[in-house]
Amino acid sequence: MSVEALYQDVILDHYRHPRGARLREPFTTEAHHVNPTCGDEVTLRVRVSPDGATVEDVSWSGQGCSISQASSSVLSELVTGSTVAEGLDALAAFQAMLARESPPDEDLLGDGIAFAGVAQFPARVKCALLGWMAWKDATARAVAQVTAANEEKP
């Protein structure tokens, strides 16, 4: 089996059996993103720890192509339980891989490396990044919200 076929299988598995694909409560913040190019959309919820350092949960709901849906699944599985900093590092590595700025880092991206081939199709890069950008947005707001709440405490 070729590497490309293996990656295709990983993407199809995440599409057919999405991880984190039900909006859950409780959550700290929510973000809704749309890819205007193709109409894909995702609503993503993130819950961070009381100190804002750990991603306790990521859940999402969306519609669109297999790439956007599978990528959101990979993201959910990868960053749930990680620190916010580790999640942001994974996002940076994912973006760099899709921009062909660096080779895929399996240790950092896990199943996310299956999307390396998407870089060949610029129109699909936005699909692959949709859930990741929603996560970045929701997480930034969650950390800001938790930080502000902690500063208000006596």
Image (tube, rainbow, N blue to C red):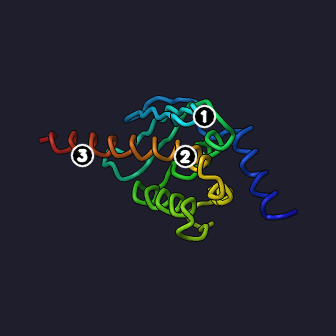
Q: Left or right? Give the position of 146 relative to 128.
A: left
Q: Give the CA distance from mark 3 to mark 2.
A: 30 Å
Q: Which mark is residue 21?
A: 1
Q: Is residue 51 above or below residue 58?
A: below
Q: Neighbour class for label 3 at 10 Å: few (<14), some, many (≥20)?
A: some
Residue tagged by mark 2? 126
- Mark 3 element type: helix
Judge from the rendering whether residue 103 lies leftward or rightward of residue 139; answer left or right.
right
Amino acid under disc 3: Thr
Left or right of residue 77: residue 4: right
* Residues at circles 1 and 3 in contact by the CB criterion of under 8 Å: no
Using the numbered discs, state the Cα–Cα distance from disc 1 to disc 3 in whole angstroms: 27 Å
Q: Label 2 vs label 1: CA separation? A: 19 Å
Q: Residue at x 50, y 33 (%)?
A: 34
Residue at (74%, 51%) from the top-left corner?
Answer: 10
Looking at the image, do the residues carrying marks 3 and 2 touch, with CB atoms under 8 Å apart?
A: no
Percent x, y for residue 128?
Answer: 59, 47
Question: Residue at image x 41%, y 33%?
Answer: 30
**Quadrant of the rendering where the C terminus is positioned:** top left
| Label 2 close to label 1 by CB (< 8 Å) | no
Mark 1 residue type? Ala
- In the rendered structure, which disc, 1 or 3, sits on the residue that comes first in sequence? 1
Q: Nearer the viewer, residue 95 or 105?
A: 95
Foreground mark, 1 or 3? Answer: 1
The N terminus lies in which quarter of the figure?
Answer: bottom right
